[in-house]
Amino acid sequence: MEKTFDLVVIGGGSGGVRAARMAAGFGARVALVEEFRYGGTCVIRGCVPKKLLVFASRFADTFDIAPSFGWQVDARFDWPTLIANKDREIDRLEKIYGTLLEAAGVTAIKDRATITGPNTVRLDSGDELHAEHILVATGGTPFTPAIEGAELGISSNEAFHLEQLPKSILIEGGGYIAVEFATIFAGLGSEVTLIYRRDKILRGFDMDVRDCVEDGLHQRGVRFRYGYHTAKLAKQDDGKVCVSFSNGEEAPFDAVMFATGRHPNTKGLGLENAGVECDQTGAIVVDEYSRSSCPSIHAVGDVTGRAALTPVAIREGAAFAQTVFHHTPTTVPYDLIPTAVFSEPEVGTVGLSEEDAASRYRSIDVYVARFRPMQNTLSDRPEKMMLKLITETASGRVLGCHIAGPGAGEMIQLVAIPMGMGATKADFDRTVAVHPTAAEELVTLKAPSYCIIDGEKKTA
Ligand code: NDP
């Protein structure tokens, strides 16, 4: 094997693979070292398998409203079938990643890499690779609170491989992963309890979105324990996990899942051998071109602790390749990143929350539409869809858009385009509606529901 490269990439996830392929396309000799499977968190134990499980869990709602459309359904769910089919799809995608690297001329190596200097990487097999540039794209890893018995709990990594669907599960955390897995397990029939140390899930999201998701999960039977946390886990004789809470209560669960955040995967990488600076969370500190404190070493994706989202890692990987191997300095814009939470209701959001917009602008207008999604109107399901536009009063510019309901993720991708172009409410109003859709509400919102001037809410 060739031992000298222009670029050695450590980590075969979304960011690393994109950077490796693009750099090779620009003529660089590239090696990519991955110790586990190509595809990284997104493909192997994140976005892709999660979305497949979300699809599975949504059949519950479809079966629930089916009789109102004249269908009689006798449905039974089999977890092992879902997991086996999901695994087959992940295997297929992983192979595609390997094929893409090969087709790009990247030397793909299955091994563990340790940085031994600014331009050298040692493999566990004993080989040493020399590189003009090293790119660290090792992603993140689940963080578990240091409590007694924590090893009896699982993270999202293991949730994808449970042998059986747990009859009852406690999920700790209030972020994306906690909310999405609460949705999945509740939809598939588990009794779900979500414990979050603060007073409402999805901190940082627009408050109406947080309320909608909390209501939606409530309606699906999820129980909330707010304001305290798990303190100790112990195995019971019947195989269940007994959870002691910090408020003194105890309760047994078939499974306990920690969704308490993810930390950058930098331990044991040898970064200190090249003088690469990390922050207190272990994230590699980089400049706007993803360059670390060691000029020959760059880092992209979750390992840098910027926005931990697949499309961002891909953009960072591409920008790195453009900058270093195509002489085109390229940065990634971090404002107006659209994002979705695959909960029930689904969330799509871009731009400022109402709370943030009101604190940054003297006067904002808020337009809110709430209605029952059309597919529920023949049944007695009560849940409402919510669409919200926030504009700056003076300019009419759209500052934020927040959607909770069916198709929110698909809608927000498209709303992000005009918002990135600086669209105003008048631009939305000029657009002809597509009828009958939920998205048409975004272009038919008439008067503001209310304004916020100098922090004070006023009816418009
Ligand atoms: P988040 O950072 O979103 O949420 C972590 C949660 O754990 C927070 O509610 C946090 O509480 C809580 N927490 C942290 N430490 C402790 C502790 N010691 N004890 C109790 N609770 C604790 O992380 P996730 O793991 O949900 O997701 C990781 C990242 O992955 C996300 O930030 C997101 O970028 C990405 N992701 C994106 C998805 C998507 O795009 N749909 C889906 C899944 C993940 P507090 O609020 O108090 O800090």
Image (cartoon, rainbow, N blue to C red):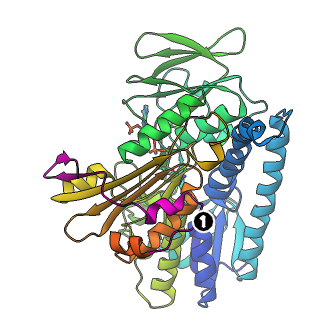
Residue at mark 1: C-beta within 8 A of ligand 1: no
Instruction: Please indicate, yes or no, whether residue 270 appears anywhere in the rendered image.
Output: no
Residues shaded magenta: 431-460
Q: Is residue 445 magenta?
A: yes
Image: 170 above or below 323: above
Question: Between 210 and 52, which is closer to the camera in this rendering?
Answer: 210
The secondary structure type at the circle numbered 1 is helix
Residue 400 coordinates in the image, percent (x, y): 36, 60
- Can you say which quadrant of the picture contains the N terminus? bottom right
Residue 166 coordinates in the image, percent (x, y): 71, 26
Looking at the image, the residue that sits furthest to the left is 454
Pointer 1 local density, CA inside 10 Å: few below 14, some 14–19, many at least 20: many
- Quarter residue 3 falls in: bottom right
Question: Between 354 and 141, which is closer to the camera in this rendering?
Answer: 354
Horizontal side of 273 relative to 423 (left or right) equals right
- Quarter residue 82 falls in: top right
Q: Residue at x 76, y 40 (%)?
A: 66
Q: Which residue is mark 1?
A: 14
Residue type, mark 1 in image: Ser
Residue 430 coordinates in the image, percent (x, y): 41, 76
Instruction: Please indicate, yes or no, whether residue 263 appears anywhere in the rendered image.
Output: yes
Question: Between 315 and 225, which is closer to the camera in this rendering?
Answer: 225
Horizontal side of 340 relative to 423 (left or right) equals right
Q: Is residue 152 magenta?
A: no
Horizontal side of 356 relative to 97 (left or right) equals left
Residue 218 coordinates in the image, percent (x, y): 53, 29
Q: Residue at x 44, y 89 (%)?
A: 328
- Quarter residue 401 falls in: bottom left
Image: 207 above or below 435: above
User: Main structural element of the magenta stretch: helix, strand or loop?
Assistant: loop
